[in-house]
Amino acid sequence: MATDENDRRPKRAVRVEDVARVAGVSPITVSRALSHPDKVKEETRQRILAAVTETGYVLNHFASSLRSGRSRIIQVFASNLTNPHFATSIQGIIEAFEGTGFNLMFAQIGYSEMLEVDVVNGALPFRPAGVIFTGVVRAEATREALSKLDMPIVEMWGHRDDPLDMLVGFSNADGGRLMGEHFGQRGFRRIAYSGHATERGAERVAGFREALAQHGADLTLIHPMEGTRSIIDGMGAFDAILEKLPDCDAMFFGTDILAIGAMLRAQERNIPIPAQVAIAGFGGLDFTAHVKPGLTTLNIEGYEMGLTAGRMMLARLNGQPVDRLIFDYPITLIERQSTAR
Amino acid sequence: MATDENDRRPKRAVRVEDVARVAGVSPITVSRALSHPDKVKEETRQRILAAVTETGYVLNHFASSLRSGRSRIIQVFASNLTNPHFATSIQGIIEAFEGTGFNLMFAQIGYSEMLEVDVVNGALPFRPAGVIFTGVVRAEATREALSKLDMPIVEMWGHRDDPLDMLVGFSNADGGRLMGEHFGQRGFRRIAYSGHATERGAERVAGFREALAQHGADLTLIHPMEGTRSIIDGMGAFDAILEKLPDCDAMFFGTDILAIGAMLRAQERNIPIPAQVAIAGFGGLDFTAHVKPGLTTLNIEGYEMGLTAGRMMLARLNGQPVDRLIFDYPITLIERQSTAR
DNA sequence: CTGAAAGCGCTAACAC
DNA sequence: GTGTTAGCGCTTTCAG
């Protein structure tokens, strides 16, 4: 960028000092012009901006953060990206922060959400400006440690009345209830659930059971599938359920993928869906609309949740008021042929 | 962690100096014990480690990186996570770095790979220890800028004989060739391709066309679909192709998702697959094995590619020799009912 | 609205 | 194998 022949030597990076010299001001004024533009006279600011372009200056985040104790890093604790719901959610988060000058740092957490204090501490050396969890933090010790940190936090994909700070999620209990209501109305009686059955899965199961009870039905069998979600697993689950509960007339799966696996397996075994067994999924992935028979499912807006999570965080970081700390996305039943009677 | 009552005041963080005092050594020795263990006497090291636990010391990355000019950050430039291939790949990368002490920073690049110098520069203030691209860097200017950086780089999901540094990919041309060979042998004559058709897509199309030519067949129609990959898009593509090429007898789609959409649309329209139109996909997503008819596809190991990319980078960072700079994953044809004759 | 001095916490370079 | 000194580049005081 500089026009002289010094370009040859990438000796040392351009510093505020260099910009300051070119602009004829002191280093601190350059710093202010860049981070608190309104605290510097417009004219000076213009001169400084010109000098920045001329010198090709870029801020050294390390020096900046070391001195200020703050950073422009958003720490994201994400679950398995193999699950399209989470992947899509993360995509939403990424897009929310695009072009904002914040940088996203990723760390993996298990699907179990049994996030340890250590995992969180491991990310703190970066003093992130904010933290986003692709889940609700369960461990009490971790919650306490986090709440002491006094930084913006977004939890996702679950529900709590007392989030650490902000929450973008939905109620698994409501989801379970919706499906229980649906199954109850249809008159199903020998009912099985397969999928995540602890933590947030437990809430879903509880809601499901509760709604079924109101129709005099109950959840006859739970076939737990923690952390797995392939089509093959769904096929296996279908067989396993019919093995234990041969007269099963309705199955509710914790993910659409498992449900599709079950439907495919039913086809292979010539078991008519929904005539003999009704099948429902969870997630609202787009292919559920296109399989035959169409798959009844609970729809969740993963991408939008991610986007919203990112925007809430951003608003908070920019000092804007966040109108709702808890943003529960509605979960809706999409009724299709696979559970028709 | 400290046992006295000073715990109440989180005045300032524990520093090397504090650890040094407790261990009865100088700060620099603490630093060395932590980052170059072999340069410190075993006994001293033990004493220091004890002091670290006692004081609850955690390294300040900002100070460390500011001083050393190095960081433990791996910059990942990722494409759209909405695409399960990329998401899975990223998952592989994440797992490769789990527990290694390196931190992953994410930035989004468009599917087009027309990564600008600016995007790259935007990440450099963090002086990453390495950079991973979920794609091959196309823009020459960017390639040059990167090569001057003198840091480990992994490019992915494509092929070049002259990678910037390391490459984990596969040959799109080979993939296209495999499918062209397959279509040619089956005797298809009115052939359409739909999907990504520029850059890496162009290589695939070229290979496809080349192999078809050897069987006296040719690629009659290209229906480009840049950056889209939903089932709905596949349904639309199917209709669009038949509109332009009513006697089309075989379609090759750039992603399995598009291919599935096409198959579903064919079912709706009562067009027999493969009797009237053969359909093939690309990617080897697991559901291709389970749909009816089974979908012929080209298999790609996304997760493994990510894992390998991460491990190559890690080996390089740990100063281990990297035996192969270019790691081409084999791409294989999975022949199923959807293209049977 | 602008500047001078100081120091964030660490490690490179050079002793010993 | 260990210590001393200095400084990475920025921004927080505190003055003016």
Image (spheres, coloured by chain):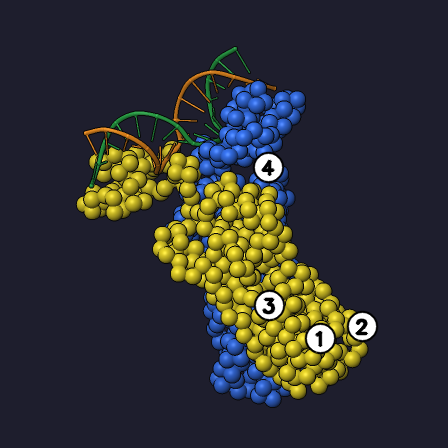
Chain colours: A blue, B yellow, C orange, D green
Label at residue B173: 3
Badge 3, how many Cα within 10 Å: few under 14, some, many 20+?
many
Q: Residue at x 64, y 83 (%)?
A: B185
Q: Nearer the viewer, residue A48 or A318?
A: A48
* 4 or 2: mark nearer the eye: 2
Q: Chain of mark 2?
A: B
Compared to B27, does B100 lie above or below? Answer: below
For the N terminus of chain A, the quadrant is top right
Residue labelled with disc 2 = B244
Q: Which residue is mark 4?
A: A319
Q: Position of residue A263 (x, y in %)?
A: 60, 80
Indicate which label's residue lies in the foreground, 1 or 2: 1
Mark 4 chain: A
What residue appears at the point 57 percent right and 88 percent down from the top-left corner? A269
- Labels 4 and 3 within one chain: no
Instruction: Tell me where residue B66 appears, x and y as whole percent.
Output: 42, 36
Tag count: 4
Gap in Å between the C-alphas at discs 4 and 2? 55 Å
Disc 3 residue type (three-letter): Ala
Looking at this view, is B294 or A198 the one in front? B294
Kind of residue at disc 1: Asp
Tell me the mark number nearer the camera, choosing from 1 and 4. 1
Q: Are marks 1 and 2 on the same chain?
A: yes
Tag shown at residue B218:
1
Q: Which mark is residue A164?
A: none
- Same chain for mark 3 and mark 2? The answer is yes
Q: Measure how far apart labels 1 and 4 are at the Cα level.
A: 60 Å
Residue A33 quadrant: top right
Mark 1 secondary-structure assignment: strand
Do the CB atoms of the residues marked 1 and 4 lie less than 8 Å apart? no
* Chain where mark 1 sits: B
